[in-house]
Amino acid sequence: MAPPELSDQQGQQTRTSAAEIHAAIERLLAGEAFLADRPWSEIWWGLMHLDLFSGWRIAIWIKRDALDVCQSATAADGRNWIYGCQRDDWTLGPAAKILEPLALLSPRQRQELEARLRRACCWPAPEPIDGDWMPPLHQLQRVHPRGRQSRPHRSPRRTGAASSALCPEAIAGGKGSMG
């Protein structure tokens, strides 16, 4: 059973724990692939967001060009953890210690993690939008969520290249529809 601070009223686990994040970081240290949002060299004081191959998303504070604490983490199944949400003993009040995943690492593991983050590969920069293929805003159609029960006005469904004037990729392939 999950500790009370990690569960909802029905006993379902809603948060991940520092131990689970620690295990994800240990897998990262063992060689699991990951991408960072920006290189370490661009951060002196700020967050480095990591996307691990296993689906974990971890945000780590870099303060004064050194590894600090884990600010937040989200597991692949959507459970999250935020700095301060897990304590060793809530009955101690303000004297309770925050359980923090990076504090569970040995000094050698912290050094390895910092070295790995300093060499991290980053997400590629987004491609610039080329005005030749991007339709003007007024030509974009409003997308309705699936499963609508009724539509006050129902236009005929278009198919084929005639309906794909806004999408050159669909014309070249001769399939798909924008409508």
Image (cartoon, grey):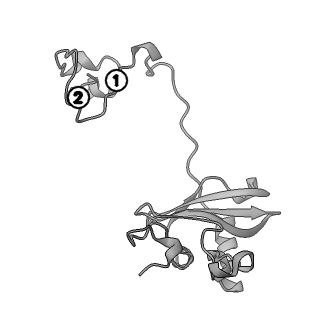
Which amino acid lies under the numbered mark 2 shown in the image of this protein?
A: Gly
Residue 7 showing in the rendered view? yes
Screen quadrant of the N terminus? bottom left
Q: In this view, does 38 lie above or below 33?
A: above
Q: Is mark 1 on a helix, strand or loop?
A: loop
Q: Where is residue 81 in the image (x, y as percent from the top left)?
A: 55, 66
Q: Where is residue 163 in the image (x, y as percent from the top left)?
A: 24, 18
Earlier along the polypeptide chain: callout 2 or callout 1?
A: 1
Which amino acid lies under the numbered mark 1 shown in the image of this protein?
A: Cys
Tag 2 and tag 1, C-beta contact below 8 Å:
yes
Question: What residue sits right under mark 1 in the picture?
Answer: 167
Residue reaching furthest right?
64
Relative to the observer, which residue lies in front, 155 or 28? 155
Is 168 displayed left or right of 110 in the figure?
left
Distance between the Cα atoms at labels 2 and 1?
9 Å
| Residue 22: quadrant of the picture | bottom right
Circle number at residue 176: 2
Q: Is mark 2 on a helix, strand or loop?
A: loop
Residue found at x 45% / y 66%: 14
